Image (cartoon, rainbow, N blue to C red):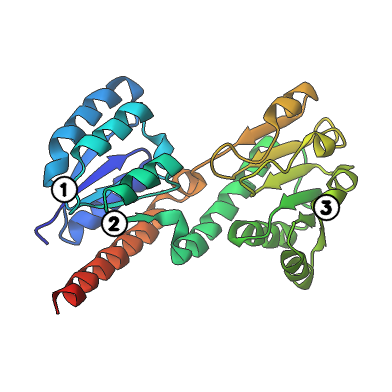
Amino acid sequence: MDRQTILLISDMRQVYLAEILTKKGHNVRCLDIRNRETALQQLEKLKRFLDKADVLILPIPVQKVPEQEIFYDILNKNLEKKTLVMGGCFSTEQRELLTGRDIHFLDFMEDTVVTEENAVATAEGTIAELVEKSPYNIDEAKVLVTGYGYCGKAIAKRLGALGARVTVLARRKEARKEAKGDGFYAVDFAFGPEEAMGAAMVVNTVPALVVTEKIIRELPRDAYIVDIASGEGGTDFACAREYGIHADHVLGIPGKYAPKESAYILERSVERFILKEKQGEMSDGF
């Protein structure tokens, strides 16, 4: 391929992704933004290189890029219409910028295949967090899993296989029905405070405030909450601190626990997106 791909490296996923894409024939230029002290220098390089870029691959989430205001300004002033942009969990402002400039972009987290495949790595990494941070074994522990999307399902199933007593909290009746069909006890969030009693662990997958004070106050003080939801998460972390409950917001789990596998997942998504755009160009030509 004669295209130039600019890849911002925020974790090991991108390191492996760069290797894979290079082997596939992409002309990859990497900008390492992991060191905040040198990130501004890397963003200055991005400003200079953007006019040569056919593909720009951003972190998951895009908010990992330091100096977001400067980064936004660079995109706004230097990003060209021909550049395909990919990243994870674009902000509303970034989406509006890209859409307004008629730039084609892909949010990896809205690629169903990526979401399904990433759920496995996310589930395994979440369990690793529980094993490391909770003072209890998973076996026989009462664990609340909030949400029953791809990640919620994968986590609940693996916790169940390890002997946990899993309760799923979900708003949608269909999700609760599915969770029950998979062998779990499932209730609406209205019953969250009742279910929190005696729970050793809570895993939140919902990117909205659902692990509220009503639930937190009923948890044992040695319970552990791990929140893997995007954005600000779905846990009242200030409330958890007030009650002395350990709560972590852990993002980018696949990049931490399965970076190479995750890189292959992203590479396949990149190739699908590029192929789709090429096919679209060919259709426009007729």
Instruction: Say which residue label 3 marks.
Output: 140
Please name the residue that numbered disc 1 is placed on: 53
Q: Which residue is mark 2?
A: 104
Q: Quadrant of residue 37?
A: top left
Amino acid type of the residue tagged 1 in the rendering:
Ala
Residue 58 shows up from this direction = no
* Amino acid type, residue under disc 2 in the picture: His
Q: Which mark sits nearer the N-terminus, 3 or 2? A: 2
Left or right placement of residue 128 versus residue 259 in this view? right
Q: Which quadrant of the view contains residue 163?
A: bottom right
- Disc number lying in front (1 or 3): 1
Kindly identify the residue that appears in the image at 18 percent across and 73 percent down: 284
Q: Closer to the N terminus: mark 1 or mark 3?
A: 1
Q: Image point 60% across, 57% down: which residue?
A: 151
Label 3 Cα neighbours within 10 Å, binned few <14 / some 14-19 / many ≥20 = some
Q: Residue furthest top?
A: 37
**Quarter that holds the C terminus:** bottom left
Q: Is residue 230 left or right of residue 102?
A: right
